Image (cartoon, rainbow, N blue to C red):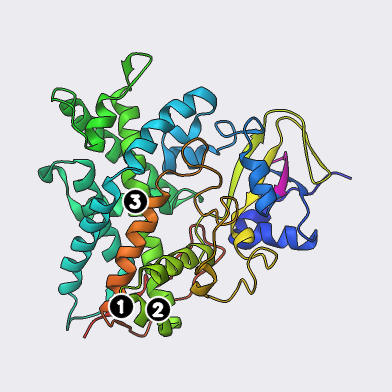
Amino acid sequence: MAAPDQTLAAAIKGYTWLPDLRRGSHGRPVPIRVLGRRAVVVGGPSAAQFFYAEGNLERHTALPHPVVSTLFGKGAVHTLDGDAHRHRKALFVTLLMGDGIETLAKLAGESFDQRAEQWRGGPAVPLFDEAAKAIAQAVTQWVGVPDGQRDLDALAADLVALVDGFATVGPRHWRALAARRRRERWLAEIIERVRGEEPSAAPLSAIAHYTEDGHHLDPRTAAVELLNIIRPTTAVAWFVAFAGHALDRWPANRERLKSGDDDFTLAFVHELRRFYPFAPFLGGRAVRDLRFQGEEVPAGALVLLDVYGQHHDPRVWPEPYEFRPERFLGRPIGEFELIPQGGGDPRTGHRCPGELITIALLSMLTQRLARLDFYLTAQNADIDLSRIPARPKSGIRVAVP
């Protein structure tokens, strides 16, 4: 009997799609079809290790066109495999895992503080939108975009649109496509000007002067890769909004964050990234006939790694639907357990090298948010798990006395 096609179920269920399938199979691999093609659903740390093992899967043929055209961009490092991926990835590792992380976090904290000062005694503001603007200001300054080249409100709206439209069709997707065209054109023009200047350590300059096989990337591809630093950094706004939701729902966590307890802050950030929905799953295509936990995975089949389900699996995380930062205190995290930005070694594999930036920004901003003594006004802060990417419907409207 042929495996059922799950395309419609994926569109309807969102984040609960793969966990529901895996729950029915008691966590074992689930053979399905998506868009008429054979696929296998896997989850858990051993599945993540299988997913990221060298030589098992390729990404460039597995990423759907709507994801590439909006979230990553044509020719991006995410679409490469093998030596081409390793070479380009080394550039991102240098830029995103070096000494500049602390500087970026400090810039984001200062930008957030400037905005927050304007909230005091005034009407409620959407935390999601405010965080996106604060982070966009910080990251564009950090990468080296000249001050006169930034229209902050329009830029933040476009960066949010790129993330918000990657997993849908219709108006959100169209807005994302339009935003990508604008921002690639904008950054390509800046990159061409920077190539006439002396190289510097700024990410903008490093990408502008980066070469492969002795040649610069064409300006549009260079713009794509610069946007792949700016866009995911701004996407941290999703987690800042989730932090506002969590601090309202579990206010006992505020005092330890306000005190500057860095160990607890890090644990709180990890729990945000585990508990709340962001990446629903990851996909790759088998490059050869494989076998995982007794299930045949023929060459060319799609492999879907259930990220959201893994983060709520009681076999990995006891009482997974409770928000408990303490679970991360004094606990080493396996590189295939907590995988909101991929698994394995970010220096050599497909795990996002910007993960350390995400953690640093969230640590900085959640402490500042807790110190504001904010409160939520009457609003609908529900999180719809059928919507990818999910976020609180209200954007978390906060008021500061």
Image-quadrant location for residue 76: top left
Q: Is residue 214 above or below residue 172?
A: above
- In terms of sequence position, does the residue under pointer 2 or pointer 1 come before the other? 2
The residue carrying mark 3 is 233
* On-image quarter of the N terminus: top right
Residue 76 appears in view:
no
Marked residue nearer the N-terminal end (3 or 2):
3
Q: Residues within 10 Å of mark 2 (few under 14, many from 20)?
A: many
In magenta segment, residue 291: no
- Residue visible at 17% across and 47% down in the picture: 150
Q: Main secondary structure of the magenta part?
A: strand
Front one among 258 and 177:
258
What segment is highlighted magenta in the picture?
35-41
- Residue extending furthest toward the top: 214
Instruction: Tell me where residue 401 appears, x and y as whole percent.
Output: 21, 86
Q: Is residue 248 above or below residue 13?
A: below
Which amino acid lies under the numbered mark 2 shown in the image of this protein? Leu
Q: Position of residue 221 (x, y in %)?
A: 35, 28
Q: Position of residue 337 (x, y in %)?
A: 60, 56
> Relative to 259, does residue 301 appear above or below in the rendering?
above
Looking at the image, which is closer to me, 264 or 319? Answer: 264
Could you say which disc has been placed on residue 258 in the image?
1
Residue 91 in the image, given as x and y percentages of width and height: 36, 32
Q: Is any atom of residue 341 visible in this view?
A: yes
| Foreground tag (3 vs 1) | 1
Which kind of residue does numbered mark 3 sit on?
Answer: Thr
Q: Residue at x 50, y 43 (%)?
A: 351
Amino acid at dot 1: Lys
Query: Which residue appears at 31% of the width and 29% of the height?
Result: 222
Residue located beneath label 2 in the image: 247
